[in-house]
Image (spheres, grey):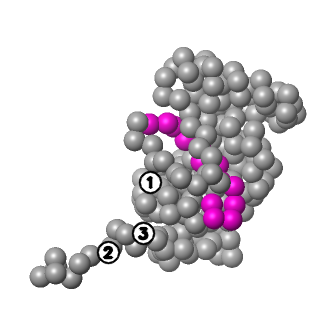
Amino acid sequence: VFIINLIKGLAKDNLIYVYGQLTDSDYQFDNTNIIVRGVPNNKIKILFYVFKNLILMVFIKPKIAYKLIKKIQLLSNNWSQFFYRLSRVLPPFLDRVDIFHIQWAKTLVYYPEFIEVMDCPVVVSLRGAHINYSPIIDRQLAQQYIKYFSKVSGFHAVSNAISNEVLKYGVNLYKISVIKPAIDRCLININKKNIN
C-alpha cells in the first residue's frame, strides 16, 4: 500500500517508471504519468524482452551497455542467471530517470549494478526485515550494506527506529528522511455504527 500511494502521489507532477516482475495480480494505474516496465513471467518472452532491451542499450548507450554487460557477466554463474539479471537491470538504464528509487535494501546487494553504474541519484527505502534483523543474522549482508550504503544518495525510513538501524552501516544522518507510511483514506472510512 505504501509504495502504491507513493507512486500515485509522485505521479501527479512527475513521470514515474515502475520496474519489476509481471504477475497476474498486477496493480493497474489509471494515471498516464505512470509507466510500468514489467519483466515477463515466461522464459521465451523474457528471452525476447532481453534481446530487445540489449539491442536498444547498445545503440542508445553503448559505453554503459559494455560496462553493464561485463559487470552482469561477472556476477552471473551461468547463462540462465545472466539473462535473468539482464532482464531486471537493463530497463532502468534505458529510461532517462532523474532519480532511481529502490524499494528493498537487499536489492543493492542482489543488483550492485544499480549503485555502481547508474548515473543518477539512488534512493533506498528502509523497512522491516531488510534492515531490522537480516543483516544481524547474515554478517555477509551487513558487510555488503557497509559497502553499498555509503554510495546511496538518500534513504527513506518508515520510522525513527529504522533510521537508527541504518546508522550502524556508516550512513550519515543527513541522508535519512523519516516518512511514515500513508494509508488511503478510503481504507479507513469506517462507519461508527459498525464499531459498536
The quadrant where residue 189 appears: bottom left
**Residue at mark 2:** 189
* Image quadrant containing the N terminus: bottom left
Position of residue 19 relative to residue 183, above or below, is above
- Estimate the spatial distance between the alpha carbons at disc 1 and disc 2, rounded to whole Å: 35 Å
- Residue 184 in view, yes or no: yes
Q: Quadrant of the C terminus?
A: bottom left
Closer to the chain start, of discs 3 and 1, is 1
Give the residue number, with chain letter if any, for mark 3.
184
Which region of the structure is painted magenta?
A: 11-23
Secondary structure under badge 3?
loop
User: Looking at the picture, how far across and down is residue 26, in whole percent?
Assistant: 45, 43
Query: Could you classify mark 1 by the number of other residues whose Cα lies within 10 Å: few (under 14), some (14-19), or many (20 or more)?
Result: some
Amino acid at pointer 1? Ser
Q: Earlier in the sequence, mark 1 or mark 2?
A: 1
Secondary element at image label 2: loop
